[in-house]
Amino acid sequence: MSMFGSDVPSGAHGDVLSATPTDDVSKANLVDEIKRRAKGSIMSKNYPEAVLLYTKAIDIYPDNAILHANRSMCKLSMKQAKNALEDAIKATELDRK
């Protein structure tokens, strides 16, 4: 069940949240769109929405350190330090730089 109250996400980002790309090009395009939308959510300080978007992107690319780092920043902005730390640790495990 999604945070929108049904099995299929709805709302402004339902299209990307319910997308299930299968090939590499479709995955890359979807994650690019998700990152664009997440940036807009961050700019409007809608951190829960950004976390939801980054979570979808991480589902597609679980080994992408930047996605984990960005979600960590959003969680920290929401005063969720413990959850933010978990994402930050994962990001540094994936990329020590």
Image (cartoon, rainbow, N blue to C red):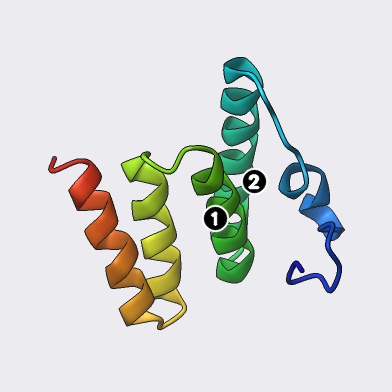
Residue type for callout 1? Thr
Q: Residue at x 40, y 81 (%)?
A: 80
Residue carrying label 2 = 37
Q: Nearer the viewer, mark 1 or mark 2?
A: 1
Q: Residue at x 37, y 39 (%)?
A: 64
Q: Is residue 66 above or below residue 80?
A: above
The spot of residue 66 in percent (x, y) is 35, 43
Name the N-terminal-most of marks 1 and 2.
2
**SS at mark 1?**
helix
Q: Whole-Å distance between the Cαs marked 1 and 2?
A: 13 Å
Q: Residue at x 20, y 41 (%)?
A: 95
Establish if 55 lies above or below 5.
Answer: above
**Residue 85 sits in which quadrant?**
bottom left
- Does 62 sit left or right of 97 as displayed? right
- Sort mark 2 into few (<14), some (14-19) or many (20+) by Cα contacts within 10 Å: some
- What residue is disc 1 on? 55
Q: Foreground: 4 or 34?
A: 4
- Check if mark 1's residue and mark 2's residue have beta carbons within 8 Å: no
Image coordinates of residue 68 in percent, x first then y, are: 38, 52
Frontmost residue, 3 versus 48:
3
The quadrant of the rendering that contains the C terminus is top left
Q: Within 10 angstroms of label 1, few (less than 14), some, or many (20 or more) residues?
A: some
Which residue is situated farthest in the left direction here? 96
Mark number for residue 7? none
Say if 32 sits above or below 18 in the image: above
